[in-house]
Image (tube, rainbow, N blue to C red):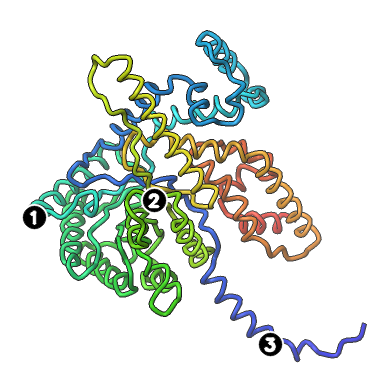
Amino acid sequence: MKLSLQDTDTAALLDQLGEANLRFQHTYPGDRPDRQPVHTVYGGANLFKADTCVRMGEIALRNLQTYAPNFVELARVLQLAGHEHLPTLEKDIHYLTDYLDKLPADQRRQEPAWLAYTVYNKVVQKLKSEAVEDFRIDFEDGFGNRPDAEEDATAVQAAHEVALGMTQGTLSPFIGIRIKPFTEDLKARGVRTLDIFLSTLLEATGGQLPANFVVMLPKVTIPEQMTTMVRLLELLEKANNLAPGTLKMETMVEATQIVMDEEGRNPLMRIVRASEGRCIAAHFGTYDYTASAGITAKYQTMAHPVCDFAHHMTKVALGGTGIFLSDGATNVMPIGPHRGDNLSFAQLRENQEAVHSGWRQAYHHTMHSLIGGLYQGWDLNPAQLPMRYAATYNFFLSSYESAVHRLKTFVDRAAISTLTGDIFDDAATGQGLLNFFLKALNCGAISEEEIVPTGLTIEEIETRSFYRILAGRRRTA
């Protein structure tokens, strides 16, 4: 064949392009395969105890069993797929439940009631075993502005409770502290609280932090606030003999200025870069953001269009960077208005209607987030936990079959490329498809064995990396 150019003519050009490609890949490495919690529970620091997460699970389970004592009731309230074909009489519900209980898992999956039955039972199991995945000890909105002496004392007490929880094994798998923002009025208070909390905790634990510990800096609007936090974390690490880079942080998207700056640019990437690799997540503050956009209190909701705009701008700015994104919270609590043991039938009915209405709102908000590609959100009350998991499990289980087909097709195509010696350069896309299953696996929606139909082995799944899977297959081939 005839060529006009020699390899030496194009080598320099391709080397320059190679350098640019590598810089791009460094900036946008793709989705991080690490476990991302499906939610973060924000609770006032003054209320935090070593067993808070355990007690929240117990309250959440009672809430579910009181207002949805069986899977049919929950399916009907949330209008899960196939709910209209489920029985209504109590004896028929018991019969169907008993029938499904006795079926092998593969046969149960073929039953029309499988989805509703499975979602309910997985929620129950989750509330018993790991009701809270992530908890943030809140010294900001959940705590308020209190006298300095009171906040000092609360920081000490919270640190001791975390140390006790570490000993007892009662902390959530992910945990952290939200301090006050680095605004001019509150910056000194935020620094002092973090110093007291960490110094007390590390002294009590002999220099150990709980697993997956993170510091949340709220209401960030300029990169300098992130830079200041980085320098502060460096000082705290040095003072407490922690390895450099040990302390990680998160930021919050709570103001219009963090979505669009004075020059009409999205500043989120600059703000994240200012963390010098310490920022691992960006959380959305629904109610502060809607307020900053001029939305009145009555209409401040996660479903408001301004929230979707902020979500999309955040995803566009930080997509492919490996930064975890989280939606905000539903502020309607699914709690009945009447308390006590001797309630009338009418009062019990009002309680049930209030709880079911709150459930539906939380469920739809969570589904909206998941469909929009936000796999984490906030919860503020134990009564919200059942719907967090009901929506999450419904999302993953109802999409399971199509996701299996897509990833299996992708894996087969990658295998052909490997066997023919071609370079398969869509590993990032494969990682995105794999991450659906990893997220489902992390929260308990599916098991490792349920990923095997995609054509991946258990060993490959455990690498959590599509690139490593391809590299391993290439070596084998």
Which mark sits nearer the N-terminus, 2 or 3?
A: 3
The residue shown at (31%, 38%) is: 381
Furthest-right residue in this view: 1
Q: Which mark is residue 147?
A: 1
Q: Which mark is residue 74?
A: none
Q: Is residue 234 above or below residue 195?
A: below
Residue 420 seen by the camera: yes
Q: CA distance from mark 1 to mark 2?
A: 28 Å
- What is the three-letter code of the residue carrying label 3? Leu
Q: Is residue 2 above or below residue 124?
A: below
Left or right placement of residue 475 versus residue 371 in this view: right
Label 3 secondary element: helix
Q: Quadrant of the rendered structure where residue 227 is?
A: bottom left
- What is the three-letter code of the residue carrying label 1? Pro
Which residue in the protein does label 2 denote? 328
Residue 251 seen by the camera: no
Please name which of the two marks, 1 or 3, marks the residue nearer to the observer. 1
Q: Which mark is residue 13?
A: 3
Residue 47 position within the rendered picture, expressed as x and y whole percent measured from the top left = 19, 41
